[in-house]
Image (spheres, grey):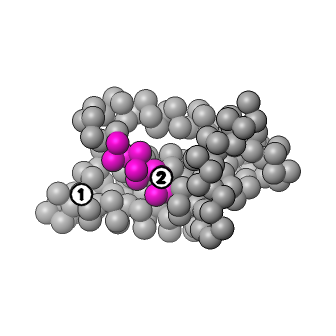
C-alpha cells in the first residue's frame, strides 16, 4: 500500500523531479483537465476533483510518514487537484490555461489567508487544504477575469 500511496501522492513519481516539483505537479493537473474536458461532462470533472482530494489526503499522509516530515516536496497531488479546482467551469482556452496556471502557482507560493493556517492541519489534510483554499481563490479570480474580459478567454 505504501508504494501505491507514494505513486499517487507524487502523481506517478513526478514529485521526484529535482527542480520545482510543485510546478510539474500543477502541469499534471493541466493534463488531467485536458483529459476530463475531452469527455465534456462537468459531473465527471467534479468526481475527478473529489477523488483527487480524497486520494490526496490519504496518500499525502502516507508520504509524510515515508519522508519523515510534514508536507514533503515530493507530494504534488495537491497541486494537481489545485489546478483542476482553479479551472473548474472556466473555459479551457490556451490563454485561460496559461493565466490559471500562473495564478494558481503564484497564490500557492503567497498563500493568502487562511491558506497558510490550513497548512498546520495534521497529515494529508494539511497538505491538501492550503492548495484547495488557494485554488478556490484562483477559481474566483478566473471567473472574474472571464466576466471582465470574456473575449480574451473564450
Q: Which residue is mark 2?
A: 28
**Badge 2: few (under 14), some or many (20 or more) residues near its Cα, within 10 Å?**
many
Upstream in sequence: badge 1 or badge 2: 2
Q: Which residue is mark 1?
A: 93
Along the line of sight, the residue nearer the viewer: 9 or 54: 9
- Give the image quarter of residue 113: bottom right
Q: Residue at x 57, y 47 (%)?
A: 11
Q: Is residue 5 visible?
A: yes
Quarter of the picture holding the N terminus: top right
In the rendered image, residue 153 lying in the magenta stretch gets the answer no
Q: Residue at x 53, y 37 (%)?
A: 52
Quarter of the picture holding the C terminus: bottom left
Q: Secondary structure at mark 1?
A: loop
For the stretch drawn in magenta, what is the main secondary structure?
Answer: helix
Q: Is residue 125 visible?
A: no
Image coordinates for residue 81, horizontal then vertical, percent: 50, 46
Query: What are the residue bounds of the magenta stretch?
Result: 26-35
- Give the image quarter of residue 94: bottom left
Image coordinates for residue 84, horizontal then vertical, percent: 42, 47
Tell me the number on the disc at residue 125. none
Amino acid at each position: 500500500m505504501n508504494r501505491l500511496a507514494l505513486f499517487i501522492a507524487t502523481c506517478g513519481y513526478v514529485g521526484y523531479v529535482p527542480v520545482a516539483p510543485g510546478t510539474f505537479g500543477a502541469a499534471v493537473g493541466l493534463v488531467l483537465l485536458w483529459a476530463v474536458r475531452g469527455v465534456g461532462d462537468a459531473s465527471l470533472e467534479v468526481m475527478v476533483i473529489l477523488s483527487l482530494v480524497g486520494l490526496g489526503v490519504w496518500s499525502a499522509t502516507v508520504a509524510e510518514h515515508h519522508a519523515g516530515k510534514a508536507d514533503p516536496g515530493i507530494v504534488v497531488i495537491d497541486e494537481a487537484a489545485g489546478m483542476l479546482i482553479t479551472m473548474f467551469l472556466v473555459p479551457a482556452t490556451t490563454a485561460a490555461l496559461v493565466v490559471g496556471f500562473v495564478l494558481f502557482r503564484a497564490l500557492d507560493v503567497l498563500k493568502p489567508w487562511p491558506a497558510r493556517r490550513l497548512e498546520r492541519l495534521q497529515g494529508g489534510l494539511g497538505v491538501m487544504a492550503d492548495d484547495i483554499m488557494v485554488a478556490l481563490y484562483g477559481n474566483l479570480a478566473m471567473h472574474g477575469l472571464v466576466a471582465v474580459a470574456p473575449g480574451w478567454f473564450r
